[in-house]
Image (spheres, grey):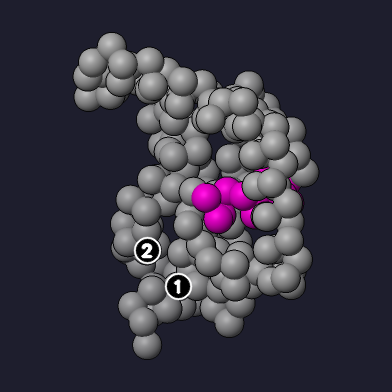
């Protein structure tokens, strides 16, 4: 039996805070990175990571390991937290890091790339939550289509079709930026 299954059972049956702490620690870095890549702000990513773990622990009884792995299920919850946060606030631009600035040519490229990413994120935020979730799980969590289908309870063919239609729309919308 996997360690995470023992922790989950211990949390559900005994309310073990130690097991909950261990489960959070095991997935914290991965989930934080998944969220940070989407919001680009350390403070927002920390808040959303915490919110995601709270939501996951509260709904742990509904977790079904036959449908998805725990990490995938956790990314599913986090994707919805990011979508909800995006609805409440305008999209956040990704801050510049000092190492991104090398030469004037590189700086111009970085600015153009950051602006394109910001515009694409704004575009995706206007889509349905279901389509945003597919996009976020595929792009930011790098999940394969079968896992996305499993966690969203949709047929894999439908997930692929929606994803590739969205990518085609993004390419058409932003082809001038390439």
Q: Main secondary structure of the magenta part?
A: helix
- The residue singled out by tag 2 in the image is 23
Q: Looking at the image, is mark 1 or mark 2 earlier in the sequence?
A: 1
- Residue at 48% over, 68% down: 70
Q: Describe the element under mark 1 as helix, strand or loop.
A: helix
Q: Is residue 73 visible?
A: yes
Is residue 118 shown left or right of residue 28? right
In this rendering, position of residue 7 left or right of residue 141:
left
Q: CA distance from mark 1 to mark 2?
A: 8 Å
Pointers 1 and 2 in contact (CB under 8 A)?
Answer: yes
Q: Which mark is residue 8?
A: 1
User: Could you tell me residue 5's position as x and y percent?
Assistant: 42, 78
Pick whichever, 114 or 25, lies toward us: 114
Instruction: State which region is magenta.
Output: 129-139
| Above or below: residue 174 compared with residue 158 | above
Depicted 155 relative to depicted 34: above or below: below
Q: Residue at x 75, y 66 (%)?
A: 158
Where is residue 77 shown, x and y percent of the image? Answer: 58, 54
């Amino acid at each position: 039996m996997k360690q995470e299954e023992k922790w989950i059972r211990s949390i559900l049956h005994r309310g073990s805070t130690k097991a909950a702490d261990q489960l959070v620690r095991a997935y914290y870095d991965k989930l934080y990175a998944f969220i940070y890549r989407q919001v680009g702000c350390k403070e927002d990513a920390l808040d959303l990571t915490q919110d995601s773990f709270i939501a996951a622990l509260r709904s742990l009884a509904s977790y079904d390991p036959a449908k998805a792995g725990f990490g995938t299920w956790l990314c599913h919850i986090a994707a919805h937290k990011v979508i909800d946060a995006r609805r409440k606030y305008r999209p956040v631009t990704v801050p510049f890091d000092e190492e991104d600035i090398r030469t004037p040519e590189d700086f111009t490229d970085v600015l153009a790339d950051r602006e394109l990413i910001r515009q694409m994120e704004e575009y995706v935020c206007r889509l349905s939550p279901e389509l945003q979730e597919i996009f976020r799980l595929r792009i930011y969590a790098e999940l394969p289509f079968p896992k996305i289908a499993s966690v969203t309870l949709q047929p894999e063919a439908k997930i692929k079709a929606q994803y590739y239609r969205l990518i085609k729309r993004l390419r058409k919308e932003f082809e001038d930026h390439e």
